Amino acid sequence: MAGPLIKIEGLRVAFDGAPAVRGVDFAIHRGEALGIVGESGSGKSVTWLAALRLLPEKAVVEGRVSLDDENLLEVPVERMEHLRGGRVAMIFQDPASALNPVLTIRRQLGEALALHRGLSGRSIDAEAKRLLDLVGIPDAAGRLKSYPHEMSGGQNQRVMIAMALAGNPDLLIADEPTTALDVTIQAQILDLLQLVRRETNMALVLISHDLGVVAENCDRVAVMYAGRVIEEAPARDLFDAPRHPYACGLIDALPTLDAPRRLVAIPGVVPDPRRMPQGCAFSPRCAHAAPACLGGVPELRRLEPGRRIACARAGELDLQPAAVVPPVEIARPEVTA
């Protein structure tokens, strides 16, 4: 296999001395889909905001983010502006805060097309209309003249997806891209992202709380907790047989249709970054915690080919999740480019 498209090594992020990301390492290859899951506060979004240098100045970022041979944390600002949106694009979780309320949709889409693809004039209008058609916005030509406040939350989310695709990126980071959409449109958008992946060999990072969506759309999954990756494995392997107690807990918290049962919640909450527990950060909430779990922060190590886990008891626990995560099955309208 060729080398990774992007590789994150030892990424750490702190705000006012409080660690939000505590040494994240993983790599993504061309055409691959990586899912990132975990509770709110686990550091999923902050990892990628840091990688793209989109955090405020008070954030202290350390480590290396290699895109081919370039370290994104060190390249000049002008070069970063070219790479961000061009080679690496991001769909933000909240379109209301990502779109400029005083600029038309045409102006905002046109800026991306001009900057990253060199288009101008009528070429921008034609391509902007095509992108809005692609993401399923009716009356695309008319909507180009609209402002964000004149559109629904779901339509603004689709505009954000169109803007992310405008630069034909090598890597697309989708942070909860279907949060504001109904189930039918969610299926269309996910099919669209898969279509673009197949046709362009684009890599995809899907950050989501919906494990069913991740199971269907991702080749590999990284489970994050308290600012670290605590398990990484092929998607089907992880959902069939999780090896970390936290990953097993996430799966057990899901409802099932074929065998109704009482949901098993993970006790407690994600720890405060300023008061991290001794040893493994998950140990206060873990039913399998042992004295070995307090001896230090467990290293993310290779357990078997394609699988890494950060657990002091890795290999000795026999975890049996009660829930099974099936891929999302939805009747899907045909998506065409």
Image (cartoon, grey):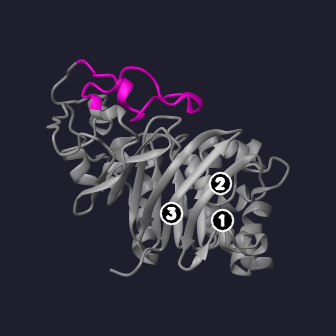
Question: What residue type is disc 1 on?
Answer: Leu
* Crowding near the residue tagged with mark 3, few <14, some 14–19, many ≥20 C-alpha atoms within 10 Å: many
Residue under label 3: 8
Which residue is under mark 2? 61
Q: Is residue 275 magenta?
A: yes
Q: Residue 151: x and y, percent?
A: 70, 44
Q: Secondary structure at mark 3?
A: strand
For marks 2 and 1 on the same chain, the one whose residue lies earlier in the sequence: 2
Furthest toward the top, the residue is 262
Magenta part of the chain: 262-291
The residue that appears at 58% across and 60% down in the rendered structure is 63
Residue that lies at the very extreme toward the right in this rendered image:
102
Query: How far across and how far down the image is residue 105, in percent?
Result: 75, 57
Assign the N terminus to one quadrant of the image: bottom left
Is label 1 in a helix, a strand or a loop? loop
Look at the image and say whether residue 289 sits in the magenta stretch: yes
Corner quadrant of residue 142 = bottom right
At 48% from the left edge and 40% from the top edge, which residue is drawn? 182
- Label 1 crowd (10 A; few <14 / some 14-19 / many >=20): some
Q: Is residue 296 above or below residue 27?
A: above
Q: Disc 2 or 3, which lies upstream in sequence? A: 3
Confirm or deny contact between disc 2 and disc 1 (CB under 8 A).
yes
Would you say 25 lies left or right of 78 here? left
Residue under label 1, please give it: 73
Q: CA distance from mark 3 to mark 1?
A: 11 Å
